[in-house]
Image: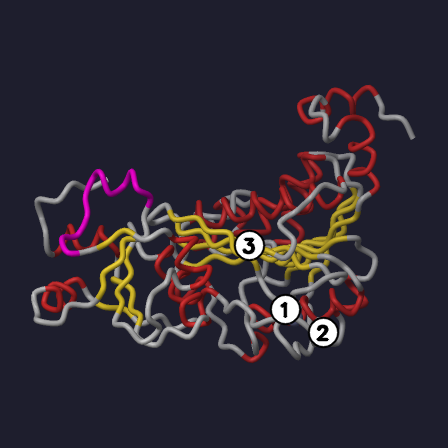
Amino acid sequence: MPLSKEELARYSRQLVIPEVGPAGQEKLKAAKIAVVGAGGLGNLVLSYLAGAGLGEIGVFDSGPVELSNLHRQPLYGTGDIGALKTGLAERRLRELNPQVKINARELMLTADNISAELAPYDYIADCTDNFPTRAAINKACFALGKTYVHGAVFQFEGQLAVFSPRTGPCLECLCPGAGAMENQACAESGVMGPAAGAVASMQAMELLKLALGLETLSGRFAMLDFRHGDFQVTEIKKAPGCPVCGKTGGPGEKFLASVAVDLISPEELKERMGSGSPPRLLDLRYEWERGLCYIKGDAWMDFDALTKDGGGLDRGEDIVLYCKGQSKSKAAFRKLRELGFTRVRVLAGGIDAWAEKIEKGMTRY
Ligand SMILES: [Zn+2]
């Protein structure tokens, strides 16, 4: 059906983009997306999907608005405290775009009801804040053959992945046993509002690209450290014997929050660097960053070369990795562990912490 004059005007800023155009807009209008969770991630995902002119949006949530939600959930106001999120979200989204059909469902998705609830939708957004629901979404989407976009936030960090049942991998490959994990909801661990907003915006982008038939992040995993400005995208491999997505493939990546990384404090590193047997200290930052500052006695190492095959280093050698913060080093740590390195540690807080605690005159950036 051709777009109305109002639709042409409403969506004109995206219609002019070659990848969208009127044909793409009609694809969006035909698409149905379910958003599980109407909290920090769900708020922005829902707003962007409604604004872009999706055909139908499902909103699943069972809780009321709380005062502590407001710093990251811009769909709600102070006067909404105590009211159910689903009803409020539905009303706000209708105001935003009356042309979109909103199906608000006030219920908790469980293993018993999730497949039936998600079945009518083309794509799913995982905007929950707890492991059991994430695992249930993963299982249901793979059973139903539906691609979904996973997002999670923790303090200054965020992560994002697109999981496709056609190819795998899945959340279980990334995070084995997610369903049995303790709930690390924002209430205990805390979250910066913009971290939720940034991850949600990226989730919305991946969902719109799925509906448009464009290439997505599928099979890759984005780890975002907003505290230190470290953003990594790595490939996720299917875990052999994954109970959800199949039995082929190499070793899986581990989930950001569940990997125990061996850290060394700046104080201990200083002591070790002054000892008779200092560790091999590797700077994983970009070369331009070395022009600003570096730790004496270190050596620069190319991140890609190191994580590809170990960069020619001895697997038993005593190694300390550092970057600006610690995200890049953590990513390298995980790779080196997979490659068989046994004595690797990461400088806690990176060169930022070193400059703060040890070398106070060092250039900060
Ligand atoms: Zn899997």
Looking at the image, residue 279 lies above or below residue 179 = above
Type of amino acid under label 3: Leu
Disc 3 is placed on an element classified as strand
Find residue 215 and report its horizontal and vertical position in percent. 69, 44
Q: Main secondary structure of the magenta part?
A: loop
- Name the one closer to the observer, 35 or 38: 35
The residue pinned by badge 3 equals 160
Disc 2 is placed on an element classified as loop
Give the alpha-carbon distance from disc 3 to disc 2, as whole Å: 21 Å
The residue pinned by badge 1 equals 238
- Location of the N terminus by quadrant is top right
Give the residues in magenta. 286-297
Dot placed on the residue nearer the N-terminal end, 2 or 1: 1
Looking at the image, residue 105 lies above or below residue 179 = above
Q: Quadrant of residue 154?
A: bottom left
The residue pinned by badge 2 equals 246
Type of amino acid under label 2: Gly
